[in-house]
Amino acid sequence: MGKNCLIFFLLLAASQLQAQQNCTHPGQTPVSAIPICGNEPFVMNTPTYCGNTPVPVACPGGFSYTNINPNFFRMACYSSGTLGFTIVPDAATANYDWQLFDITNRNPYDIFTVPSTFVACNWSSEPGETGATDDGTELLVCSGSGLNSYSKMPDIVQGRTYLLMVCNQGGSSGTYQLTLTGGTASVTDAIDPKMDYARASCDGTKIVLRTNKKIVCNTIAANGSDFTVSNGVNIVAAVPGDCSSIFGSDSVILTLAQPLANGTYSLQISTGTDGNTLGDICNKFMATGESIPFVVTDLQQTTFQQAVASSCSPGSVELVFSNSIRCSSIAADGSNFIITGPQQVNVTGATGIRCNNNSVSEIIQVQLSVPILTAGAYQVTLINGSDGSPLLDECGVPLAPNSIVSFNVAGSVSASFTFNAIESCKGTTINFQHNGNNATNNWKWAIGSIGTSTLQNPVQSFPAAGQHTVQLIVTNGTCSDTSSQQITSSDKLTAAFDVQNIICPTDTLQLKNNSTGNIDNWQWNFGNGNQSNLPVPSSIRYVVNGAETVYNITLIAGNSQMNCGDTASKTVRVLNNCLIAVPTAFTPNGDGLNDHLSPLNALKADNLQFRVYNRMGQLVFETKDWTRKWDGRVNGVLQNTGVYAWMLSYTHHDTGEKIFLKGTTLLIR
């Protein structure tokens, strides 16, 4: 991006600057956005005194999404595909966030008020690199720690215009590099600027030049030195047309030192005294020596030549004439024109689009009360205005009334879609519907991180709970549109619970219900004849029955409307009693009876320590876990029959009493 490109972003309307009073650097507001013309990296500095306007983001509350310390980048899509880019800060601790908007045929400031301009974003609180790459899974990444700093690469559509906002949430100045990489879309303008046509004014003192694209106004030398005329007549001045756009103007009025006589001439491009030829905003310049012919003849009747409208939902129509029209003869209410066609069209105004620097314009823009949405052929008829006067050309000659030109409008498509969520025990199934309006023949769905589809009405299952950004891009081959919505899915129905493995008789059973999904009924069975339909039953106890018993606990979690459910089971061992004691003898012979030595029923022994010693006073076994038992071996070696001493200390869980016991046990083989 050259220096010439950046100069023009200072052309900001005063009314727009009021909303961003401190944002005076190029690229700090939507209308001063820096154009991206290719894949060259940008190294950007981020001042930290700009931006406090909320941005609509479909994320939960708790974080303020605003354009803090922004840089804006504007790009046109020349070939549909995915847009990939990386933002690499110079400091690894810097936190940059971004959001991409579709601003096709919109005021760039709509990004602050119109949620449907959303395309993709990443507001993750994680510092360091960010962007849209293959590492991303969602188009929408909200604020929060631990979230992916990369988003899924969004799809962009040929012919549409996008705005990328990069914010420095960290609040400290610094630089970063923005690089477009990895995507399949093209944002490179392949069209070189050229002269389109030239004609002489009716008095022969001026040449009106039209270019094939907008030319940056300050690349036009004011003294006309960018041009020469074939017969040697000097050009003394060059004035661009309407320069209100940051992209410049597509017309230039050249003033000659003397009138041209009838004849054939050529207009040729030269290097001006400013050191360059005419260039576009992407630093592409017209080739020196390029020429275009034009003919000067006797005064001809000005004709109504062409009506030009956007093929998709035009809100205005541009009318082209063979010669310039006096701006003063154009009725401001648009009453010089009638538009007819399949849709009723009301004209509300008309202006010469190059009347800023000239009193004439060869193009008149007609404003409509509402955009044309119905496809078909339309006609523009030229009539006298509401004041009874006709249009006058630059020489003051009235245009012939009832002149008619036609233009076509393709059916505008809308990507708005509806959906129907069906809850089941297996999760959420969503049926997406698009109405296929105006011959829509291509659908491209991006359904969160779940999948994609090219069907008109896809069906997608969501097995887990969450929020998902669903984006749809539609086209009918001429018109396209993009929309996105946030949808919520539910968990599949799963029964699950936690319970103690072992409890004492008469103690209360502690339950934790971990079931998930859309559950409206619970059925508990505790294996002892007791049941409950509460989500978390309380006061469940097992009575003393004289023996240690294992009970099977079952939970059935269900949904009555969907007539489905899920079952979970666990066992609990209820001890015979919880009197803590150490056996006086044990027989480690492997018969399954009294094979081990340990404190019995020590479920309520906190901070337990159990030690066993042989007759020599040597420690042969030690544990702090009452369920870990001595098998009568030391380092795998069987110990001899005999008396072994033991010591036991613990704190009683219920009373807090500290207890110390000691005794002897007979090992029998």
Image (cartoon, helix red, strand yellow):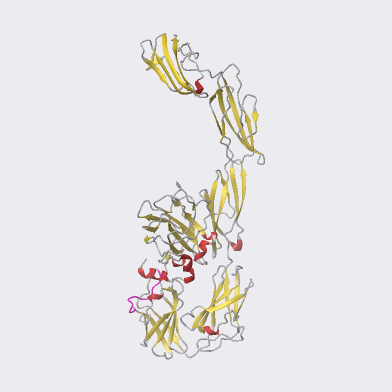
Residue 268 vertical position relative to residue 529 in the rendered view, above or below: below
Q: Is residue 60 above or below residue 637?
A: below
201 or 519: which is nearer to us?
Answer: 519
Please state which of residues 186 and 622 is positioned toward the viewer in this rendering.
622
Quadrant of image for the C terminus: top left
Q: Position of residue 499 (x, y in %)?
A: 55, 29
**Magenta-span inclusion, residue 293:** no
Horizontal side, residue 606 vs residue 279: left or right: right
Q: Vertical placement of 142 versus 333: above or below?
A: above
The spot of residue 660 in percent (x, y) is 45, 17
Q: Is residue 622 left or right of residue 483?
A: left
Q: Position of residue 14 (x, y in %)?
A: 47, 71
Please report the bounds of the magenta region as a residue range: 272-281
Q: Quadrant of residue 251?
A: bottom left
Q: Position of residue 508 (x, y in %)?
A: 58, 27
Indicate left or right for 259 with 273 as reference. Answer: right
Q: Is residue 12 visible?
A: yes
Instruction: Please name the residue shown 42% across and 90% down the image.
Output: 259
Q: Main secondary structure of the magenta part?
A: loop
Q: Is residue 586 among what the camera can see?
A: no
Q: Is residue 170 above or below residue 350?
A: above
The one nearer the camera, 43 or 427, is 43
**Would you identify the image quadrant in which residue 88 lies?**
bottom left
